[in-house]
Image (cartoon, helix red, strand yellow):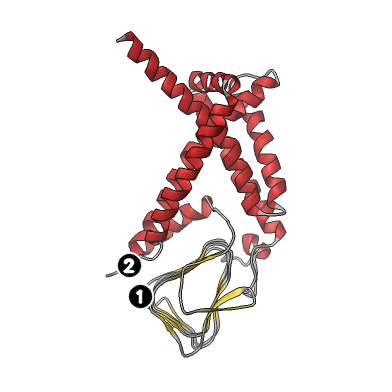
Amino acid sequence: MKRNPRAFLFGWIILALIIIASPTFVFAQALRTDGDALVVRAGSTEGGDIATISQPIVIDGVVEGDVTSVTGSIIVRGSVEGDVVSLFGNVTFEADSIAQGNVMAATGEVQMQSGADVAQAGAVFNGNLSDSGAAALLPVEGNQTLNTSTRVILAVVLAILATIIASLLSLIWPRSFASGAQIIRLATQRALGLGLVWSVLSVVVVGGIALLLIFSLVGLAVLPVLLLIAQVPYLIGLAAIAMVIGQRLNLHGPAAVLVGSLAIVLPAIGLAAISLPAAFVWFYLSSGVGIGGMFLLRSTVVQRHSLQF
């Protein structure tokens, strides 16, 4: 089947904008770990896809599927028959290496030594053509994970996006978020409980679907969209809980949401310097209270309509 480079690029750019970094997970068998990297040994063949989070990959042998690392760099010394993707790291092809599919370093650099045969049936997407910018903060040897500066910058970018979106949502539905904030103040524990239930269900459902999709070419295109959709409730929840914080400071409307959002995302940025998972846990727990409040608001509205009929 012929691969569509444009669809490939579009899907992974979306995922790069909504990076979800977490502790290392490895979806592969018959491999070994050498230091911090997952290694396909020379002379060996891995029949399926390889995907890691927060772990570099070194290909000395042959991989018959795709090779993907969400926040790790990739070194190819052997052969890859599928796509090679690193979202927040560099991709390095050493001499005599082979890659038949698409190649992407979304925010890093694709480095190719003389003699490398790359993108035989695909295209190369280099996120750092000018050798400056994001890649200056990323691993250059392909065997390291994100450093502190990179984690903080990623957290700042995501925090700005979340704050802007939450503020825009409050402009579109000001009454709904004001009512949701009132319910959160009156039933904080219930809102927190519903938010936790929603988060657990989201992890189970989205995580299960992601594991099924990540091994297929079709899945690589669908997965970014799935992860993007999963963030929408949390952005709504952020606007709701931010409204509560802003109102406590005697602010109203979008101004309350803007200030309240900053009160949530700034600690997340600080936590990112220590641990990205901790930063995301803080953000999702805080936004989860807002999700619970909006659920309670919805149930109250439905109950009122039922009583009227």
Residue 48, how many percent across, how many down? 39, 74
Residue 192, how many percent across, how many down? 56, 32
Q: Is residue 121 above or below residue 255?
A: below
Quadrant housing residue 143? bottom right
Q: Residue furthest left?
A: 1
**Image quarter of the N terminus:** bottom left
**Image quarter of the C terminus:** top left
Q: Give the mark, 1 or 2, whose residue is nearer the N terminus.
A: 2
Q: Residues within 10 Å of mark 2 (few under 14, many from 20)?
A: some
Q: Is residue 295 above or below residue 108?
A: above
Q: Secondary structure at mark 2?
A: loop
Q: Nearer the viewer, residue 161 or 186?
A: 186
Is residue 131 toward the left or the right of residue 218 in the image?
A: right
Q: Is residue 166 visible?
A: no
- Residue that appears at 47% across and 22% down: 297
Quadrant housing residue 242? top right
Contact? badges 1 and 2 (CB < 8 Å): yes
- Residue hosting label 1: 121
- Residue that appears at 54% across and 33% down: 193
Residue 308, how many percent across, how many down? 33, 9
- Residue that appears at 54% across and 53% down: 19
- Residue that appears at 50% across and 18% down: 175
Rendered image: mark on residue 220: none
Rendered image: mark on residue 3: 2
